[in-house]
Image (cartoon, rainbow, N blue to C red):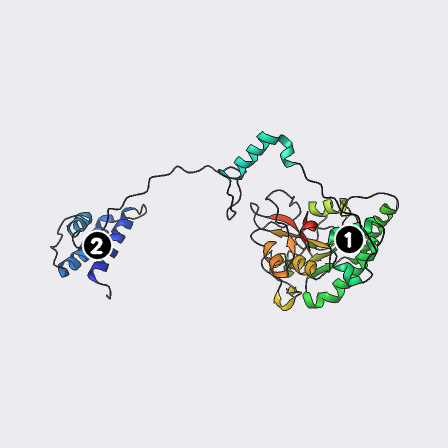
Amino acid sequence: MDSTPFEFLEHAEAELMAMEHDAAATGVERREFVFRSLVAAAASTLGVRSLGAQSPQAYFDATAGLIARPARRQPPAQEPVALGNGEAPALQFMPYPEGTGALMERMVARHGVKAFARSTFTVEPWVGAAPTSPEALAFLPAHRLSALIKARKITSRQITDIYLDRLEKLNPTLNCVVTLMKESARAEADAMDRELAAGKSRGPLHGVPYGLKDLFATKNAPTSWGTGDLKDQQFDYDADIVVRLRNAGAVLLAKLSTGLFAQNDWWYGGRTNNPWNPTIGSSGSSAGPGSATAAGLVAFAIGTETQGSIVSPSIRNGISALRPTYGRVSRHGGMVLSWSQDRVGPMCRTAEDCA
């Protein structure tokens, strides 16, 4: 043994104390006998008398002059804290005393239902001539595309075709598209243009094209969850986020890649790449939404986060995104990774788009 006798005694003491607090330990008398034998041998080396039948604690009392240390005190027992369903998930920093549940109760007490009223985001009208370059249009923030469409300076079908062309052209490099929905996208865009011509506007997302992470159910396209085993998986309903965006006038262009079962940026088609540096991945698991949004292949995209799946690809690809409060956005129709942490949020090129 390379340790000094003093180190051995300290180690033996620690082992004995651990043994005293081990509720599952059996044969304690035998274990104490073995330890007494060992520490007695060490004590004789140091010139300390053998313990004989004394207890281990008596031995350490006897050697107090050799190894001086303050008496150990057990921390006071704490009552377990009851956590309700309104508390934030683990791994989330919530500085408010007593947690999210207490904060919500206080807000309701002070403001009633007004505490949860949604703010209105007003799209400023477009002023001046519209860009003529397809690339310039493709990289416009979503809310500026909204202003162009509302002002009838471009049509939803025009910007939809621009994005569909870019998706087909750049996907071999980025590998971010699982299913390109050309026919349905053009039909939706045409319908939005007809409504606008008739004087009906559904709001800021009217006619704006977007992409969807491929873990949300859609009637007219497979939903693979990133695995080749389920690449033909088909649902007979649309996820709630798809329904809400359709009702708001948004045009779905493509199902975008997610890592295998919402893990990292590798899916059954390979790795999704960063548009600014295709030699590295897009990060995940909202890899496709992050890559496609940054490259100007969609006006915005919908991702999900359990533990970094919106934030990480947004950082890697240099875009803005919003990871909403847990439970704020419906997850119906989405693959469940962790029911207590999964969140749905927008991945955009500007903070205003997230609003």
Which numbered mark, 2 or 1, is in the foreground of this view? 1
- Between 316 and 62, the one lying in front of the other is 316
| Position in image of residue 272 (x %, y %) | 64, 64
Can residue 163 be seen? Answer: no
- Between 255 and 125, the one lying in front of the other is 125
> How crowded is the residue under tag 2: few (<14 C-alpha within 10 Å), some, or many (20+)?
some
Quarter holding residue 279: bottom right
Q: Residue at x 49, y 37 (%)?
A: 98
Tell me if 248 is positioned left or right of 102 in this view: right
How far apart, in angstroms, are the residues tagged by discs 2 and 1? 77 Å
Quarter holding residue 288: bottom right
- Between 19 and 251, the one lying in front of the other is 251
What SS does tag 2 mark? helix
Tell me if 324 is positioned left or right of 249 in this view: left
Q: Residue at x 15, y 57 (%)?
A: 43
Task: Indicate which disc, 2 or 1, sits on the residue closer to the N terminus.
Answer: 2
Q: Are marks 2 and 1 in contact (CB under 8 Å)?
A: no
- Between 117 and 267, the one lying in front of the other is 117
> How crowded is the residue under tag 1: few (<14 C-alpha within 10 Å), some, or many (20+)?
many
Residue at numbered disc 2:
35
Q: Residue furthest right?
A: 198
- The quadrant in which the N terminus is found is bottom left
Name the residue type under label 1. Answer: Leu
Report the disc number at residue 145: 1
| Position in image of residue 317 (x %, y %) | 64, 61
Tell me if 121 is positioned left or right of 340 in this view: right
